[in-house]
C-alpha cells in the first residue's frame, strides 16, 4: 500500500486524527453539552466500552504507516482522563506521531500539569475561551466554577511558547467580546481563532440566526488591527492573519459560510472506538471491534483503508440540502 496514493474518493489524503478520550466534561457549554440534556440522567459510555490507552497507541502505530502524522486529543474534557500524559508520551515515543496536541477548557490546568504535559512530549495546547466575563462564563458553560485564566495563559506561554485559543462566537452571547479577547490574548505570543457556531449534534439548539459570519469578525478586527494574510497548509480549517505590531495571529474557522471540505485530511475516533470520516457524519465505523478480536495489524489497516478509500463526505458544502431528520452525533462524543 503506497502512502502517496492513500486518498479518498475526492483525492484527500489521510494525515490527521482527532481522538476523543472521554465523553465526560466538567462544563456544560450550551453549544456542546447543555445541562438540560447532559444531566444526572444522561447515560455516558460504559468504562468497558472505552478504548484503552494501549488500544489507542496500537491503532495509531498502525495508521502511522499509511500517513498519520498529526493527532489532537479531545473530549469531553481530556484532562478528566487519568494519566493522560502517559498516553501523550507513548503516542510520541512508541507510535512515532510527529505532532500531538490537545484541546482543553483549561479549568484543570496548573503549572505542574502544564510542565508534566510538556515533558511527556505534547507539542501544543489549545484553550477553549468563549468569554472573559465571569457572568457570561456561568451562562455559557453552565457552571459557577472559575479558574485563574491569567495563570493558565502565562503557563501555556511558558511551556509551549505559543498560546492558542478557540472562541465559538454566538450572536447576542459573546459576539461583543471579540475585540476584548483579541486585545488580551494578543499581548502574548498567540494564535487566536474564532469559530462559527456549528450545527453539531442534536442538543445545542443550533439556529442559523445565531451565527456571526467570519467575514464580519475579520472586518471588525481589521478596523483596529491591520491584518495581513498568512499562508497556511491547504488542509487547515483556519484562514490565518497576522496582527500588525504583535507576535500574534487571528484565524477564522468558517464551516458555515466558507466550507473547507475540499481539502479535509482528518478522521475522528470516538471514545468508544468508532471511526468517523467527518465531524458531521451520521454514523461511525466500529474499528474497536476489529482491534478487540485480536486481528492482525494488516487486518486493522485494511479495515481503515477500505473505510477511507470510500470516503466522500462534504457535509459543510451540502448542509442545507441534507434531510432535516438526518441523525447527528454529539460533539462531546466525537471530539469536535
Image (cartoon, rainbow, N blue to C red):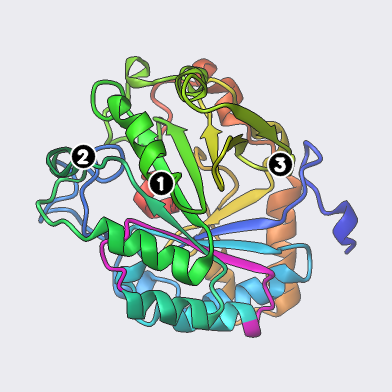
Q: Residue at x 73, y 54 (%)?
A: 306
**Front one among 262 and 54:** 262
**Where is 75 relative to 319, above or below?**
below
Q: Residues within 10 Å of mark 3 (few under 14, many from 20)?
A: few
Question: Quick check: is 203 in the magenta stretch?
Answer: no
Among numbered discs 3 and 2, the one appearing first in the sequence: 2
* Figure check: 246 above or below 164: above
Q: CA distance from mark 1 to mark 2?
A: 20 Å
x and y, in percent, of residue 198 in the image: 42, 31
**Residue highlighted by disc 1:** 185
The region drawn magenta spans 93-110
Which residue is drawn at the image coordinates 32% and 20% (left, top)?
210
Instruction: Specify the quadrant that holds the N terminus.
Output: bottom right
Which residue matches tag 2?
140
**In this rendering, does residue 326 appear at all?**
yes
Number of numbered tags placed on the structure image: 3
SS at circle 1: helix
Among numbered discs 1 and 2, the one appearing first in the sequence: 2
Q: Main secondary structure of the magenta part?
A: loop
For label 1, count other residues whose C-alpha is less than 10 Å away and answer few (under 14), some (14-19) or many (20+).
many
> Which residue does the numbered mark 3 point to in the structure image?
232
For the residue pair 285 and 263, the one nearer the viewer reads as 263
Amino acid at each position: 500500500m503506497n502512502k502517496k496514493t492513500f486518498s479518498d474518493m475526492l483525492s484527500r489524503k489521510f494525515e490527521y486524527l482527532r481522538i476523543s478520550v472521554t465523553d465526560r466534561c466538567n462544563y456544560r457549554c450550551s453549544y456542546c453539552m447543555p445541562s438540560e440534556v447532559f444531566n444526572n440522567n444522561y447515560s455516558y459510555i460504559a468504562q468497558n466500552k472505552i478504548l484503552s490507552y494501549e488500544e489507542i497507541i496500537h491503532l495509531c502505530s498502525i495508521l502511522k504507516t499509511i500517513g498519520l502524522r498529526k493527532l489532537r486529543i479531545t473530549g469531553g474534557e481530556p484532562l478528566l482522563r487519568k494519566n493522560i500524559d502517559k498516553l501523550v508520551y507513548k503516542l510520541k515515543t512508541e507510535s512515532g506521531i510527529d505532532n500531538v496536541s490537545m484541546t482543553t477548557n483549561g479549568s484543570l490546568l496548573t503549572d505542574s500539569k502544564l510542565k508534566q504535559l510538556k515533558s511527556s512530549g505534547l507539542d501544543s495546547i489549545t484553550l477553549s475561551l468563549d468569554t472573559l466575563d465571569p457572568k457570561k462564563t456561568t451562562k455559557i458553560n453552565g457552571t459557577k466554577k472559575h479558574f485563574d485564566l491569567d495563570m493558565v495563559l502565562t503557563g501555556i506561554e511558558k511551556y509551549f511558547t505559543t498560546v492558542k485559543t478557540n472562541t465559538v462566537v454566538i450572536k447576542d452571547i459573546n459576539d461583543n467580546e471579540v475585540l476584548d479577547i483579541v486585545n488580551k490574548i494578543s499581548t502574548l505570543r498567540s494564535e487566536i481563532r474564532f469559530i462559527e457556531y456549528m450545527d453539531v449534534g442534536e442538543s445545542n439548539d443550533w439556529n442559523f440566526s445565531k451565527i456571526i459570519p467570519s467575514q464580519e469578525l475579520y472586518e471588525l478586527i481589521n478596523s483596529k488591527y491591520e491584518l495581513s494574510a498568512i499562508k497556511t497548509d491547504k488542509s487547515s480549517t483556519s484562514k490565518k492573519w497576522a496582527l500588525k505590531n504583535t507576535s500574534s495571529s487571528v484565524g477564522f474557522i468558517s464551516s458555515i459560510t466558507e466550507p473547507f471540505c475540499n481539502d479535509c485530511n482528518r478522521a475522528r475516533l470516538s471514545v468508544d472506538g468508532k471511526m468517523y470520516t467527518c465531524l458531521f457524519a451520521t454514523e461511525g465505523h466500529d474499528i474497536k471491534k476489529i482491534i478487540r478480536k485480536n486481528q492482525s495489524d494488516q487486518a486493522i489497516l485494511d479495515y481503515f483503508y477500505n473505510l477511507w478509500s470510500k470516503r466522500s463526505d462534504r457535509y459543510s458544502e451540502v448542509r442545507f440540502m441534507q434531510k432535516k431528520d438526518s441523525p447527528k452525533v454529539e460533539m462531546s462524543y466525537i471530539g469536535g
